[in-house]
Image (cartoon, rainbow, N blue to C red):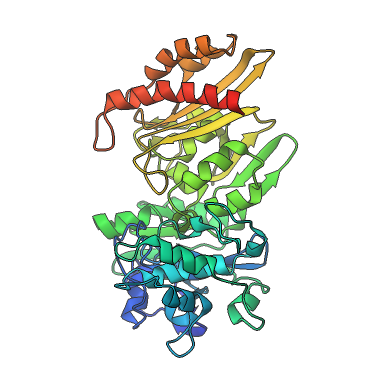
Amino acid sequence: MTTIPALKVNGEPTAIGAVPVHTSVLDWLRDRGLTGAKEGCAEGECGACSVLVARPGTDTPTEWTAVNACLLPIASLDGQEVVTSEGLGSPADLHPVQSEMAVRGGSQCGFCTPGFVCSMAAEYYRPGRAAGCGDHEHGPNGFDLHSLSGNLCRCTGYRPIRDAAYALGDPAAGDVLASRRDAPPPAAAVTGMVSGEGEFVRPASLSDALGLLEREGAQVVAGCTDTGVQVNIFGSRPPLVIAVDRLDELREFSFGPSEVRLGAALTLTEIERRLAGRVPLLTALLPQFASRLIRNGATIGGNLGTGSPIGDTPPALLALDASLVLASRRGERVVPLASYFTGYRQSVKAADELITTIIIPLPLAPMTAFHKIAKRRFDDISSVAIGYAVEVVDGVVRDARIGLGGVAATPLRARATETALIGQPWTESTVRTVAAVMAAEGTPMDDHRASSSYRSAMLGQSLLRFYFGGLDA
């Protein structure tokens, strides 16, 4: 299947043209003279490439979403709408975000500024922003500073950028981009694009996607936050790329009496907003997962599908006793996440299977926490990650589930620690004794992020921190 892919850029319909299928949105835009977006890292860590894409919204039909243009293949935006920094305003008619950045000294060399402007504009247009209240991470105008996480500046300093963000009012009447939120987003275009590098396909249905998965060398993508890095940094060129991020069958969300069902293609930002704090363990996890730019594209199914031992969602989902629905042309099967990982970046998922849904059973444990040990508080990779879900009745531990990441070739349950806790009094004495068991879990290794002894020490300290934090609560 081949089509003539096109998209709307700054309001103008534009054919994608005959380009290699692995061409990034960033390279494609810059080749067309839209050079505001820059390549700083090619890994989605600096935000210099940020642009706005019209996506399905949580509170309005359409939401302007900031994404990393360096990671997405241009083929993935077939039929979509993109706004770059050039499309927000002009030197003669600055957009409010651009104006505030200018008058408050938010730019020096200017390399990162267009990316900051696009991320700031996404928050400027976020529905309900003005309802926020001022604290150390929110402005009096409701501006969430986390919306700028993943945008780095080496020379200006962040105070004037923050000042610009906090000075923004509401969009004026007649603002075209504000009005656009009230109309439906572009439908996902069925796409077929071929070049000498390979083939990109956006199938029309899950059934079509599962059929394509039977082909050798097929690579499934959603937000491309992992595959995009492989393409940019390591020169990966999968012969067949299958985009599943807009398949309706993978975008389920339900919060029922006995379980929560999360579609594998929901982005982490969508999950955070739709759950609205109803799963406290995920509420604690999600702000620590990479950056807002990454969470706007990354999906929960993608994070599990990579099989990484340092992915942030597996420890929390293991503690929540989650299961995965795997689908192929042979049918569906449900696999407990605790049985899913089999080795380093390996799992029970067959090559022709796709993760469609994550199931979290209810009710939830009353005591939960997520601890991420990393060199930075935000936008960093874990050295160790721990998810807790504990039930204490009449001072005795009735149940305990603890998920671990970064201490073995796979994410895993801390089974010995769980066994040592269950049936014991929930006291400092018990926890200090069991912390030694926790410190011996897994097979941690030495690498550039942490030593094995440090990782083990952090496991034991984490259990103590969980206990004393629980007492404080």
Residue 250 lies left or right of residue 383; in this view the side is right
Residue 369, how many percent across, how many down?
A: 54, 32
Q: Which sits in the foreground, 351 or 469?
A: 469
> For residue 57, which quarter of the picture?
bottom right
Q: Eyeballing the image, is 265 above or below 369?
A: below
Residue 321, how many percent across, how many down?
A: 57, 29
Residue 172 lies left or right of residue 385; in this view the side is right
Q: Which sits in the foreground, 247 or 391?
A: 391
Q: Eyeballing the image, is 340 above or below 58?
A: above
Q: Eyeballing the image, is 266 above or below 461?
A: below
Q: Looking at this rendering, what residue extends furthest in the bottom direction? A: 92
Residue 409, how many percent across, how many down?
A: 34, 30
> For residue 167, which quarter of the picture?
bottom right
Q: Which sits in the foreground, 225 or 140?
A: 140
Q: Residue at x 63, y 15 (%)?
A: 398
Total marks in image: 0
Q: Eyeballing the image, is 397 above or below 229?
A: above
Q: Is residue 217 visible?
A: yes
Quadrant where the C terminus sits is top right
Q: Is residue 237 visible?
A: no
Q: Residue at x 40, y 70 (%)?
A: 106
Residue 161, how many percent across, how many down?
A: 43, 66
Q: Residue at x 47, y 53 (%)?
A: 298
Residue 31 lies left or right of residue 141; in this view the side is left
Q: Which sits in the foreground, 322 or 200?
A: 322
